[in-house]
Image (cartoon, grey):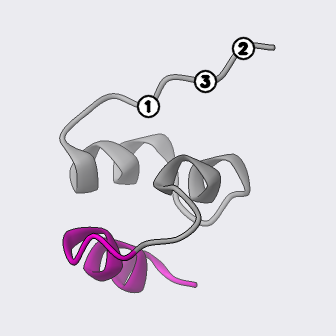
Amino acid sequence: MNYDLIKLFYGWKVLQPAIEWYVQHGFIDADQYKEITGKDYVVPTK
């Protein structure tokens, strides 16, 4: 999936899995995450 589709589906509230998954798996980067969500990406801790 590309950035434009992720942004579109997120805006429609139908994006699955959660947008954080797309950052973790390299589909979008932290800057793109912030552009889409308006929030900073926080790396999950285990």
Q: Position of residue 31 (x, y in %)?
A: 37, 44
For the point 43% across and 31% down, the residue is 41
Q: Kindly identify which residue carries mark 2.
A: 45
Q: Kindly identify which residue carries mark 3.
A: 43
Type of amino acid at the residue the image marks with label 2: Thr
Residue density around tag 1, few if under 14, some if 14–19, many if 20 or more, within 10 Å:
some
Magenta stretch?
1-14
Determine whether 5 is above or below 23 in the image.
Answer: below
- Discs 3, 2 touching: Cβ within 8 Å: yes
**Displayed quadrant of residue 10:** bottom left
Q: Position of residue 25 (x, y in %)?
A: 73, 56
Looking at the rendered structure, the secondary structure element under dot 1 is loop
- For residue 2, side relative to residue 45 (left or right): left
Determine whether 4 is above or below 24 in the image.
Answer: below
- Discs 1, 3 touching: Cβ within 8 Å: yes
Q: Residue furthest top?
A: 45
Quarter of the image for the C terminus: give it: top right
Q: Residues under labels 1 and 3: Cα distance?
A: 6 Å
Q: Kindly identify which residue carries mark 1.
A: 41
Determine whether 39 is above or below 1 in the image.
Answer: above
Q: Residues under labels 3 and 2: Cα distance?
A: 6 Å
Residue density around tag 2, few if under 14, some if 14–19, many if 20 or more, within 10 Å:
few
- For residue 8, side relative to residue 24 (left or right): left
For the point 37% across and 54% down, the residue is 32
Asked if the stretch drawn in magenta spans residue 26, the answer is: no
Type of amino acid at the residue the image marks with label 1: Tyr
Labels 2, 1: front one: 2
Residue density around tag 3, few if under 14, some if 14–19, many if 20 or more, within 10 Å:
few
Determine whether 34 is above or below 29 in the image.
Answer: above
